[in-house]
Image (tube, grey):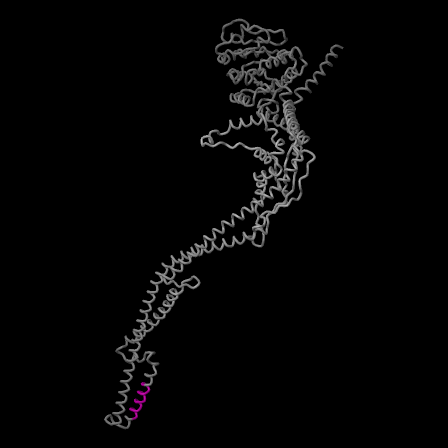
Amino acid sequence: MQEQQLETIDQEIHLRDYYHVIKKRRNLVCLFAAITFALVCLVTFAVTPLYEADTQVLIEKNKESDLTVAGGMISYDPEFLQTQFEIIKSNNVVYRVIDRLKLDTQYRRHFLKDTDGFLSASLDTVKSFFSESGTSENLGLKAKEPTDADRIAEIIQKRIETKPQRNTKIVLVTYQDPNPVMSSMVVNAMVDSYMAELLEIKMHASNYALQWMTAKAEEERKKLQQSEMVLQKYRQENNIVTVENKQVVVPGKLAEFSIQLSKAQALRKESEDLYNQLHIQENNPEAIESHPLLSTNLALQRIRDQILLADQKIAELTTKYGAKHPLMMKALSDREILNQEKAREIKRIVQTIKNQYLLAKSQEQNIANLLEGSKQEMITLNEKMIQYDIMQRESETNRALYDALIKNIKQQGATEHSQMVNVWVVKKAQVPETPATPKKMRNILLGLVLGLFGGIGCAFFIEYLDNTVKSSEEVERRFKVPVLGVVGQVDDKTRSIETIIIEDPRSPTAECYKSIRSSLMLSSPEHPPKSLLITSVEPQEGKTSTSLNIARTLAQTGSKVLLLDCDMRKPRLHSILGISNRVGLSSFLSGNTDKEIVAKLEENNLTVIPSGPIPPNPSELLGSERMTNLLQGLAKKFDYIILDTPPIMSVTDSQVLSHLVAGVVMVTRAGKTNYEMLGKGLKMLQSIHAPLLGIVINGMSEKISGDYYYGGYYKQYYAAAEPEAQEKSAA
């Protein structure tokens, strides 16, 4: 809750600062506002009033005229309305209006009255002077002079305006003219001329497009016919047979031969394996006979069955007869015949397998040769097909282009008499009763507001550029150094600030110095500083008058005060007090005098030591041991010693003396000392560890600070208090 209150207070102070800036620059604000208001009023009442007539027109694309869009839907075209606006303000439309209303003949004086006579001649002379002369003359040509219709068209184009109505397809066409009747006539004629121009554009474009596409279609037809003939001739010469534009004969043969080769290779492999198995057992008839292929042979099986029966018969005969018996010998002879027949059958089967192997091998080789021939034929055909495809693509391209042209010709013929843009006049323009421009009341209020805010802006801009000291709060915020007091300007020209303490001790300025005296008394925790050095950043900031007035206010308390003029370069203290400067501080420090350098004044408790003659080496004299001893001796005789020194940015005298005093006071002048210079001066004192007590702001006024406290209220308070004090003293 407390933080919110602090933020509110800061915000109020911030707004009050703005108010002070405006109040301080009120003369500038009022002057800027008055000039702006006067200019706006002058222009408003001097300009010729214009009457504005408007007509509402519905503009949209014709969906039926575009057959290329699927479903009759028109695609979004963001440039459509802008194109129509440019057509409305085009030269063709404007010249139609001029011809329709006879503006260049019957109403010529209405448009060209301001450009006739001397003014027209002057404008032509200026234009010819600034134009790039010589270009047309070098070519032997002469520039065409603008006609009345050209000048009127230029005027109308500047005054015509088009703008779409929000969320609708309606367009508002407006025209401004000094004559209300003329404004309505021109804007209505503008819409009619625009519709006529659209119709002419459509007719001209359709006729030209039909003529061009017809000629182009005939040309493409001839190209198509020629390309197809060339393609057919090439096909016949190279024996290219295609089905649905695809080559199928050679690829079919190649595929068939590949299949047959695979089968022949399998058959040859099988026959070869069987033949090799039998060939290995060629000398072993029993092994050959046991081969699965021979064991399943029917003829061989039959012979084996007969041999088995013969063996059985021999076995029976053996039990009855001997080896030489005729039956026995016949049985043995029959078995031998059967064995020979079996051997011949086995040999025949082996030979058959061999023949099958050789046949399979031969067939494989033949098919391989056929496949290789087909491949070569395919390669040759592919080379021919490359050229064939090129010729075919050219033919297809010609056909596609020809078909597209025929289609566009038919479409253009179907939409020849339809409008691409539909235009309907929703509201015709009426004769306006009141002028549209200038809006006097609005301009006056606008001029007043602009003048006021512009003046405030200028005030803040100048305030931003003004980087001089203007308030004690800003000085303390920037440099973290206390401000001992603020001295206002003396408005009474008959009084001098150097004598204000004596002549008018109850004045606001005198009270300011008394306030500074109080601040100095409280600047040290144990006791007030007995010796003070008064300096400034730059010359003419009031350090001498401040030194004198602080010394006088201290003397008024009953203390013994010594004012020492240490400015040996441009001393002023002796001239202000009217004392001699023949002998002074420089004389004592240089050892050129034995006389008393202290000057007594008529003022009680105030003693002054002038600077003396200007020496060639002030810094060396002020930094000498003799100066240190002098201050130590004077400190025993006086309660306060005040040193008036040169500006710190000009010379080093103040820096040399700053280590010999108990406190340093920096004097600045409001509206003159800028913050950069003050910061540099304070930094110089801080770098040498000078005992800086604070800053005195001199020459403050309400005009500089913008604060009523420094001006009106403070002066009014003491002005009212002074007569009361005089009455009490008189009583």
In the rendered structure, does residue 704 fall within the stretch colored magenta?
no
Q: Is residue 199 above or below residue 573?
A: below
Of 703 and 615, nearer the camera is 703
- How far across and down, in percent of the image, does residue 57 sit? 64, 43
Label the magenta part by its dominant secondary structure.
Answer: helix
Residue 647: tell me if it is visible.
yes
In the image, taking residue 305 as reference, residue 161 lies left or right, namely right
Q: Is residue 331 above or below residue 379?
A: below
> Horizontal placement of 304 versus 725: left or right?
left
Tell me if I can see residue 436 in this picture: no
Q: Residue furthest left?
A: 324
In this view, which residue lies farthest toward the right? 731
Can residue 313 be found in the magenta stretch? yes
View extreme (top): residue: 595
Q: Which residues are magenta?
A: 303-316
In the picture, the quarter occupied by the C terminus is top right
Please report the residue visible at 58 percent of the width from the left and 54 percent of the height from the top: 71
- Quadrant of residue 169 in the image? top right
Q: Position of residue 100 (x, y in %)?
A: 61, 39
Q: Position of residue 238 (x, y in %)?
A: 36, 61
Compared with 358, 484 (above or below) is: above
Q: Is residue 659 left or right of residue 106?
A: left
x and y percentages locating residue 627 in the rendered image: 52, 12
Q: Quadrant of residue 391?
A: bottom left
Q: Toward the viewer: 491 or 533?
A: 491
